[in-house]
Amino acid sequence: MKKIVLIEASPKIGEGSTSGYLIKLAEKYLGSYGADKTLISVRQSLRKKNNDEDFESISNAEALIIAFPLYIYCLPGLLMRYLQDYLQYYKKKETASRHPRVYAVVNCGFPEPGINLEAVRVIRSFSRSIGAEFRFGVMIGKGGMVLNVKDAPFMKNKLDKVFESIAEDIFRGSKEEKQNIIIDLSFPRWLYFFMGNRNWFSLARKNGLRKKDLYRQPY
Amino acid sequence: MRATIISDKEFRTILYQNLENSTLNFLKGRGFDTEIIEIGREALNFCMGCFDCWVKKPGECIVNDLVSHINRRFIGSDAVIYLSPVVFGQFSANMKNAIDRWLPNMLPFFQQRPDGSTMHPSRYSYVPKLVIIGYGEDISDEDRQLFIDITEKHRRNVDVLIFDNPLNDVSKELSKIRLEKLEGKL
């Protein structure tokens, strides 16, 4: 049975995250291939006094799928901390690790999926540092909408195809170079802007703030 | 004139010490009131993407740690210099935490840049000149290019410098950059 580690790196606490949803979806698809899956929440793993057991799972994996949101154009600090710590663990390890295949699934709040490209390149660089084989990234734009439309056919079909292709790539062991997958939701950009902007005012009102309060300059 | 150096004290290499000292000496020599903020592993909480800095306490992070001082100092500076190890072609974890938690300084709204890409506008009319110095003894060409792309591609008020040798002359490079506040174009 192939050992696959699914790494969920949403920094959010106590609320549903897009990365959490995506990693669960990956888990479902891999299940149909009979994989031996381990799910790691980066936030929870970092809180452990000793996360060697999680690092051990990563170093024994044949494939790693890392799902995370884009923060200020790149990996969130939480995930950087985890990958940096893992690199230290990997360097100290005496026995040789496997050379897992690595996949990055990145979603951003901006409409353009291409903004995720540098984050995918960072995961490629990380893969090189640990002797792993980076395969491809999945770049999702308009990430703020994913959970709202996850069951709509246009979204579901796209995501189904993505995770099917990751599962296939892992189990077929393909050596061919693959391009990153772009997921661009068919939704007008102007409407996404309009709804996004309106949402901030609505959230502020719920917190007892007025429209102009959003523009405060405390410093 | 006020300047701030933000650095990562997790990697105390000779290169780091030299860069920090040379940058400090350069800024002091130019008459800047300069503060160094060194960030350690436990200094900052991770940004948790709650957006309370936009819709609950606009402009301020609700987590009370070193970041309140960093952001206040940032906005009050004419120039801010980040000294970051280049890790996997990106900012190190400690530096990325400081950058993630810079979010309160932006407004939540989407805006289109002249090139058609999306951005969040600055909360402030004027922002400090930003210089990002990446360093490391053994940076691959690919990571070097990635670090430049990450920092330059999405920002308009930034200069990026990369150093891999303690003998590199940081003063010479900094002297080519105008270190003064800019209109809030991020």
Image (cartoon, coloured by chain):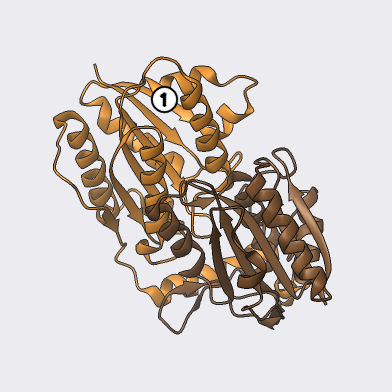
Residue at the spot 26% in from the left edge and 53% down from the top edge: A181
Q: Residue at x 31, y 29 (%)?
A: A100
Residue A132 position, x and y percent, is 33, 33
Asked which quadrant contains residue A67, the reply is top left
Residue A36 horizontal/vertical position (percent): 31, 19
Residue that sits furthest to the front in the current view: B167
Task: Look at label 1 and name its amino acid.
Answer: Ile
User: Is A143 in front, or is B127?
Assistant: B127
Q: Chain of mark 1?
A: A
The quadrant of the rendering that contains the C terminus of chain A is: bottom right
Q: Which chain is brown?
A: B
**Which residue lies under the disc numbered 1?**
A58
Image quadrant in which you'd find residue B105: bottom right
Where is residue B18 shown, x and y percent of the image? 69, 53
In this view of the protein, which residue sits in the foreground, B25 or A17?
B25
Is A160 positioned to the left or the right of A78 in the image? left
Regarding residue B106, the answer to whether it shows in the image is yes
Q: How many marks?
A: 1
**Helix, strand or loop at mark 1:** helix
Q: Is residue B134 above or below residue A200?
A: above
Q: Position of residue B135 (x, y in %)?
A: 56, 53
Left or right: where A199 falls relative to B112: right
Image height of B37 relative to A162, above or below: below
The chain letter corresponding to orange is A
Whether residue A47 is situated above or below residue B94 in the rendered picture: above
Give neighbour class at mark 1: few <14, some 14-19, many 20+ (Cα, 10 Å).
many
Residue A18 seen from this side: no
The residue at 71%/77% (across/down) is B124
Q: Is residue A148 above or below residue A172?
A: below
Work out which quarter of the rendered image holds the N terminus of chain A and state it. top left
Q: Residue at x 48, y 75 (%)?
A: A194
